[in-house]
Image (cartoon, rainbow, N blue to C red):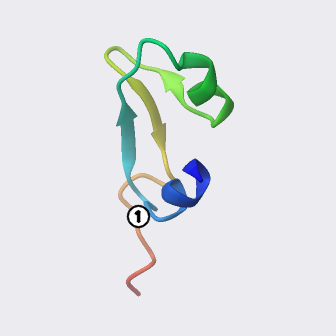
Amino acid sequence: MMQMLLDELPGQHVCLFTDEALNFYKELGFTKGEICMEKVIGKWLVNTSFT
């Protein structure tokens, strides 16, 4: 389900805040940033879904 949501966000930087689900988000490809678990979906700021 989470991957389905992320697939709808091409070109976006997703930042999720958690203290308890670090391993869950790591398994989805997120890395630990300064303040959140973060992941860029596709290529940052490039969204081809509108062309």
Residue found at the very far right of the displayed protein: 27
Say above or below: 1 vs 50: above
Determine which quarter of the picture holds residue 33: top left
Question: From this viewpoint, is residue 22 visible?
Answer: yes
Q: Is residue 31 rendered to the left or right of residue 13?
A: right
Q: Where is residue 44 in the image (x, y as percent from the top left)?
A: 41, 52
Q: Where is residue 4 in the image (x, y as percent from the top left)?
A: 57, 60
Residue that badge 1 annotates: 46
Residues 26 and 50: in front is: 26
Q: Which residue is drawn at 50% across and 51% down?
A: 41
Q: Is residue 22 rendered to the left or right of residue 33?
A: right
Determine which quarter of the picture holds residue 24: top right
Total number of numbered labels?
Answer: 1
Q: Position of residue 28 (x, y in %)?
A: 63, 37
Q: Residue at x 38, y 53 (%)?
A: 12
Q: Position of residue 22 (x, y in %)?
A: 54, 18
Residues 12 and 26: in front is: 26
Q: Is mark 1 on a helix, strand or loop?
A: loop
Residue found at the very far left of the displayed protein: 35
Q: Which residue is drawn at 41% across and 87% down?
A: 51
Type of amino acid under label 1: Val
